[in-house]
Image: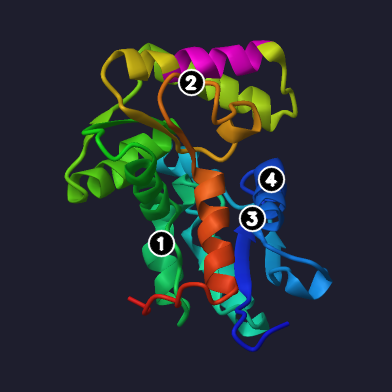
Amino acid sequence: MSNAQKTAGVLGGMGPEATVDFMARVIEHTDADCDQDHVRMLVDHNPHVPNRQDAILHGGQDPAPVLADMAADLEAAGADFLVIPCNTAYVYQDAILAATHIPLISIIGVSIAAAQERAPGAERIGLLATDGCIKSGIYQAGLEEAGLEMELPSESELGELMALIKTIKGGKHTEKTARGMEALAEALASRGAGAIIAGCTEIPLVLGNDAVSVPLVSSTDALAEITVKLATGEIPLPDCL
């Protein structure tokens, strides 16, 4: 391993299959001829993090202390930067940053940047994300800062989306689930979205980049790509906040 390479600390398990998918995509994006060329990842695969949706929507158990402890442990183990392959978890980024001294790479920011790159002329971006993520406003704030408008699912569409996400978390990747995701993405496109962000890491498990009539950005893939670039030294680590 080159001295230029950095170690990624992964706060995982939210959900378990999405974390494995993220790791596979990191491997896929790495230009490697041998084991030593690959990215070192320290992974805390913790599916027992309190439910983010329940905390945001219903005042359930706060995930922040658990996420902060995970992040601090990863830093102590040698991580140079942190990533979380779960969009909603970034609602708690302040607690994570307060507990660590290394950068946390935002899946929100890299997904918005990827949408701008994939659809440079688009002024309106569609978002498929959990109800908790949408209620938190973290994507809305990021898109507003980028000068972009957002197209969100309707209340009924969001209900359908959450049901599909629950199905995927249950390990059921059926053709019906994939078609349902496609229909929700196309509904956003039909209302003027020039690109769609799959802002939940369960969605790319059933929805491919070529399944929608407008560019589809997988937040998992966007995070994996930037993870490789940071770990291999292709781009420098950002300063800590």
Identify the residue shown where x is 47% and y is 46%.
Answer: 87
| Residue 193 shown left or right of residue 10 in the figure | left
* Lower sequence index among marks 4 and 3: 4
Give the residue type at disc 4: Asp
Identify the residue shown where x is 71% and y is 57%.
Answer: 27
**How far apart are the two marked residues, 4 and 1, measured between alpha carbons?**
22 Å
- Asked whether disc 2 touches disc 1, contact meaning CB atoms under 8 Å apart, the reply is no
**How far apart are the two marked residues, 4 and 3, measured between alpha carbons?**
12 Å
- Secondary structure of the residue carrying tag 4 is helix
Mark 2 neighbour class, 10 Å CA radius: few under 14, some 14 to 19, many 20 or more: some
User: How far across and how far down the image is residue 21, in percent?
Assistant: 69, 45
Q: Nearer the viewer, mark 3 or mark 1?
A: 3
User: How far across and how far down the image is residue 199, in percent?
Assistant: 45, 38
Give the residue type at disc 1: Gln
Q: Pointer 2: what residue?
A: 212
* Lower sequence index among marks 2 and 1: 1
- State the image quarter where residue 78 is shown: bottom right
User: How far across and how far down the image is residue 70, in percent?
Assistant: 60, 68
Identify the residue shown where x is 61% and y is 69%.
Answer: 9
Q: Nearer the viewer, mark 4 or mark 1?
A: 4
Instruction: Indicate yes or no whether the magenta region holds residue 181.
Output: yes
In terms of secondary structure, what is the magenta stretch mainly?
A: helix
| Residue 52 shown left or right of residue 73 in the figure | left
**How far apart are the two marked residues, 2 and 1, measured between alpha carbons?**
31 Å
User: How far across and how far down the image is residue 227, in percent?
Assistant: 55, 63
Give the residue type at disc 2: Val
Segment colored magenta: 176-185
